[in-house]
Amino acid sequence: MVEKRILIVEDEPAIAEVLEYNLAKEGYEVGIDGRGDTALETIRRNPPDLVILDLMLPGLDGLELTRFLKRDDRTSQIPLLMLTAKSDEVDRIAGLELGADDYITKPFSPREVVLRVKAVLRRGMGSEEGKDSLEVGDIRLDVAGHRLFLAADEIPLTATEFRLLRILIERRNRVQTRESLLTDVWKYSEDVDSRTVDTHIRRLRRKLGAEADRIETVASGGSSALASLYVFWGS
């Protein structure tokens, strides 16, 4: 099996060395960069399989580095795990809204970081786009037939509800913003109000019955109309 390459972007050498040691023990190839600006060039030149980055970095902070990576088609799909001393919810949400896959605060357990890294990499390997059927718990989505089954019962969905549920399942365990859903489900129609996402989420929850709790709404606390986040939980 080809070793997965991980880049640690951390300006505190002691922390970077602890992470490098524990990840190398698990068989990962690990690199370290102590600056955000040089890390950006390193990632663009030779994209790793996953990036662990601090938010407070010299040269370019972690949030700005994330923005650059997510705007570039060459690097937008690289999983990001944010590791920072900032524990305030606003910082966590900011990172997730920009596209981070996970967020761990300092001080941390090295073992926890290793487990989070493995989980994030598993998600990336499990892309289900193109599958004929998507299944989570009692939910089965017949992609080819545009039909939803809850246990043995067929549940009617509108075309928009189907597209929304399919995207949530395909991206399960990853945070989705209203903005990303508007782009991918509604193609950003000018006549679509951002709150229509909330309405469709409520409808899906009603139709999913006992499985409704798989869709979680996370309020970011921001003032933007696109502030709410959604996660579809599934194994």
Image (tube, rainbow, N blue to C red):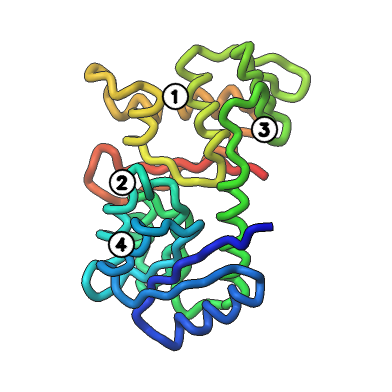
**Where, by quadrant of the figure, is residue 196 drawn?**
top left
Q: Residues within 10 Å of mark 3 (few under 14, many from 20)?
A: few
* x and y, in percent, of residue 149 in the image: 69, 20
Depth check: give the residue in front, 53 or 207: 53
Mark-to-mark CA distance, 4 and 1: 38 Å
Mark-to-mark CA distance, 4 and 3: 44 Å
Mark positioned earlier in the residue sequence (3 or 1): 1
Residue 210, labelled with which disc? 3
Depth check: give the residue in front, 148 or 11: 11
* x and y, in percent, of residue 102 in the image: 48, 58
SS of the residue at dot 1? Answer: helix
* Contact check, label 4 and label 1, Cβ < 8 Å: no
SS of the residue at dot 4? Answer: helix
Mark positioned earlier in the residue sequence (4 or 2): 4
User: Which of the two marks, 4 or 1, is nearer to us in this view?
Assistant: 4
Q: What residue is shown with label 2?
A: 72
* x and y, in percent, of residue 220 in the image: 34, 50
Q: Residues within 10 Å of mark 2 (few under 14, many from 20)?
A: few
SS of the residue at dot 3? Answer: helix
Left or right, residue 174 beside residue 23: left
**Which amino acid lies under the numbered mark 1 shown in the image of this protein?**
His
Residue 161, labelled with which disc? none
**Which amino acid lies under the numbered mark 3 shown in the image of this protein?**
Ala
**Residue at (52% x, 78% y) in the render:** 19
Mark positioned earlier in the residue sequence (4 or 3): 4
**Which amino acid lies under the numbered mark 2 shown in the image of this protein?**
Asp
Mark positioned earlier in the residue sequence (3 or 2): 2
Depth check: give the residue in front, 5 or 53: 5
Q: What residue is shown with label 4?
A: 40
Q: What residue is shown with label 1?
A: 200
* Contact check, label 3 and label 2, Cβ < 8 Å: no
**Which amino acid lies under the numbered mark 4 shown in the image of this protein?**
Leu
